[in-house]
Amino acid sequence: MSEHQPKQKKIRPPRSFGWMAEYEDENQLLDAARKVRDAGYSRIDAFTPFPVHGIDEALNIRRTRLPWFSLVAGMTGTTVALLLQWWTNAFDYPYIISGKPYASWPAFIPVTFELTVLFAAFMTVFAMLGLNGLPKFNNPVFTDPKFDRATDDRFFLWVDSRDQYFNAEKVRELLEATGAKAVEEVWEDDSPTEVPKSIYAGIAVLILITLIPGAIVLNMRNSRSPYPRWHIFFDMDFQPSRKAQQPTTIFADGRVQRPPVPGTVARGELGPNDPFLLGYDPEGVAMGKGAAVNVQMVSYQQENSASQEPIEEPPAPPPPQPDTSAADDPQASATADASSEQAGEAPSKPAGDQAPTTAEDEGDAGAGPAAEGEPNYAWLERFPLPVDAELIEVGRREFEQNCAACHGLAGYGDGLVSRRATELAQGYWLQPTSLHEQRIIDQPVGRIYYTITHGKGKMAPYADALTPRERWAVVAYVRVLQRSQNARPEDVPADADLASARGDDTTNR
Amino acid sequence: MATNSSSEDLTLPGGWRGKAPMLLAVGLICVLLSAGMCYFVGGEENRSVGFSAFLHSYLANFIFCLSICLGGLFFVMIQHVARAAWSATIRRVAELLAYMIPWWLLLFLPILAMVWWTDSPALYPWNAGSGNVSAIVEKKLDYLNPFWFTIRVFVYFAVWVLCARYFFGMSRKQDETGDASITLKCQKWAGPGIIFTALATNFGAFDIMMSTDPEWFSTIYGVYLFAASMLSFFAMMIVSCYALQRAGRLQRQVNTEHFHDLAKFQFGFIVFWAYIAFSQFLLYWYGNIPEETQWYQDRMNHGWQYVGLVLIAGHFAIPFLGTMARKVRRSRPLMAFWGVFILVMHWVDMMFVLLPTDEIHFSGLLLIGHLVGWIGMVSVFLGLLIYRTGDTPLVAQRDPWIPDALAYQVGP
């Protein structure tokens, strides 16, 4: 195409680019460079087969700014790596990997190191190219065939004609005076500047070749074939993985879905039959046992707190009290003994805690019809979670928000609602249960939890309003109220520091 | 460019030589003082850890000095094997440092005697013998027993001493004869010398240092000691050359380029040390296997964790940034400061590596006792170095590389 266009080739004399001197060893070169430098020329350069010590100083080359590029890029790499890992792993999508904290700095270091090196190395290379004005397709020095020996055994010094003080004759004389083997003028390359057509053709052919695989794929996707398709990665196309509910040959039982390992609970995955949610041990009924400490509970507690004390009921009534109450109530005493034998655990606990698991129906005088009958379950007698000051504080808050309106702030059943209703003298109003009735004090914690969860009589169920943990917290606070409202002078230790004893005694013992 | 050394005084300054007996005396007193202080470190009621603490402290200070000499030995052989010209003027100082190793065998004899004649587990728990060690160590007793331990220690020292003696002796011979073929011989033997010294240093680190906690193991431990050795050696080299120049020696022989190169080496080994130290930590931390993490467990509790943090900052971050700039590396007083800084950090490093056990906890008294012991050991080190140097010229004047080294120049 282009040969038809009349292209006028500019004709101009080749330009001089400067003078080049050739030397036989590096010491001659160094001496010459110093002389040229001292003569005042600054646009000078040297070409040597190997790095020559001292050439920077001889050519008066300014210190390079390259290290600053590397430093800034390296610091950027460090920052980017740390931010990237922190953002992805600890902030945007917090994810626990092999039990480490989200922001696990030791694990971040290898990536940080790599990115620091990568950024610094890339920046160093590209900044070096940029500062040197590379890539460059041509340099006039290549026009001189002698110059090829710069990669072999000759040393060249070059003075650029663009130098401020350049004077062709003086430069030539100066270079000749340095004992150069040869001094020559460097001319502009007079070879044609157009790109040869064969290169265009070659590029076009390469582009066409790269289109072939795409064309084949397109053809295959839009045509039919009697042959089965290719599977380049067979094991990726046919993986042994299955969808849920499908059979498999990998496991002996032929099921894809794996049952949980016995005795374990996945994080946040308590089963619906868990005593923590129910307030009683569903298996305990069937086996006729009291509330056994479930394996699941143990693991749950262990992951909750390493320093936990044996879980006991915080506000256990003072030991003498249940004895007297039991003496007052033979039935309760009998059932308490029976249940403590059944439970077979914690025999040293106060009898009052081994509250009757049966015979709940004797109470509840006015508490409603109890249509479904009193549940007869293996109530939990111990809290299934560690009881500490924080939990009791949660319990206090929830109690005062949800329960105190009826039951009263101290639990005597004299809340605002109750007082108002009594003032209105509505005859059908029944006073809410006082939590300090002996039968409530005798109830196991699981029973109270069950009442909160399912409601009782007029009391609405609170399963929707309170999480299981909050319900247990309220139970703990009820125990606190019972203990504090029924305390005796003997309960106070002789050497008690009253200010701190309150915190300790109501939480852990 | 040839040396006209007749007018130059290339021996130790006279004032230094007079100080050697005092240094040795101060050193011995300080080591005894350190023993006394460490003895009162205390421990559980029924068992004093004082003796154990002193032995660990002594070993840490001992390794501090020995590692510098080993670094010198490696440096000398590497210069020969690389046929390096630039270092010809400073190699003699490294040779003198390396040739101090026989003295360190002498200073290790007390520990050997303890291993040989007692069954005290105070330093090496395996020394208690069969039946008195844990099940894991019981299996290792075939290797870790007084007899084989002593044999191996002598083998390691034999390799080090032979290499140090050979290269020092050849260099001294060249001082007299000026025979260039001696340099060729040194170049020939430097290769095998490096291999044997590396093996001896690696296994020496396992035996002498790592077996203070025989249940634990780290395959990179020898490399760790190598990194610390080279780093502390270059720091010592910079400080020595600076001090000698202040005293009017080596003025012409060691120029800014030499300092710059030593500083570049030091910079490189700061990073190498950090790389090795962190690799060792990260792999054990990630693996999270009780048997492997125990060593770090001792070092991440009882106050030692703060020493570890000091190392991260002082052994890596601060000197890394501090000696990064070219201007700093070419400034002799600044590099002398950084050399001293690195040597102090090397001491902290050896303390962190060797002192902590489940019984020896960090305390102010222990730190002071260990510091006094260090001052003592360094005094002994300097005193012995002065004795070792004596009348020896500080430059190998007739080394064929000397003209190149004198003309050594890299850039502006």
Image (cartoon, helix red, strand yellow):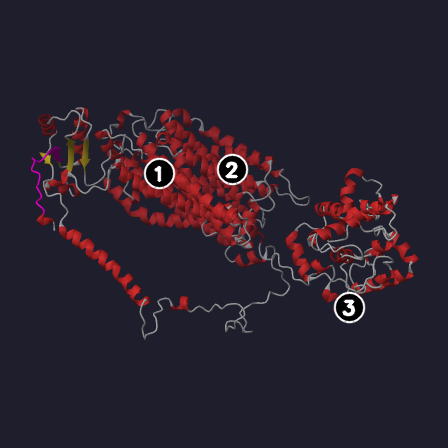
Contact (Cβ within 8 Å) of mark 3 with mark 2: no
Task: Look at the image and tell me whether residue B69 can be seen.
Answer: no
Vertical comparison of B308 with A250: above or below: above
Q: Residue at x 37, y 50 (%)?
A: B196
Same subunit, labels 3 and 2: the answer reads no
The label shown at residue A288 is: 3
Q: Which residue is mark 1?
A: A70
- Give, as a single range, the part of the protein colored magenta: A5-22
Chain on which label 1 sits: A
Q: Hey, which quadrant is residue A133 in on the image? A: top left
Residues B401 and A485: in front is A485
Dot 3 amino acid type: Gly
- In the rendered picture of this protein, how many numbered marks are placed on residues? 3
Q: Position of residue A174 (x, y in %)?
A: 11, 27
The answer to whether one can see residue B405 in this image is: yes
Above/below status of A330 relative to A6: below
Label disc, if present, on residue B292 of the rendered structure:
none
Q: Secondary structure at mark 1?
A: helix
- Relative height, residue A374 to residue A254 (above, below): above
- The dominant secondary structure in magenta is loop
**Residue A136 vs residue A42, the one in the foreground:** A136
- In front of the other: A32 or A238: A238
Q: Using the numbered discs, state the Cα–Cα distance from disc 1 to disc 2 in whole angstroms.
A: 27 Å
Q: Does the magenta portion include A15?
A: yes
Q: Nearer the viewer, mark 1 or mark 2?
A: 1
Determine which of the numbered discs, if any, sits on residue B310 in the image. Answer: 2
Mark 2: give few (<14), some (14-19) or many (20+) Cα within 10 Å.
some
Callouts 3 and 1 in the same chain:
yes
State if disc 2 and disc 1 touch (CB < 8 Å): no
Q: Position of residue A206 (x, y in %)?
A: 21, 56
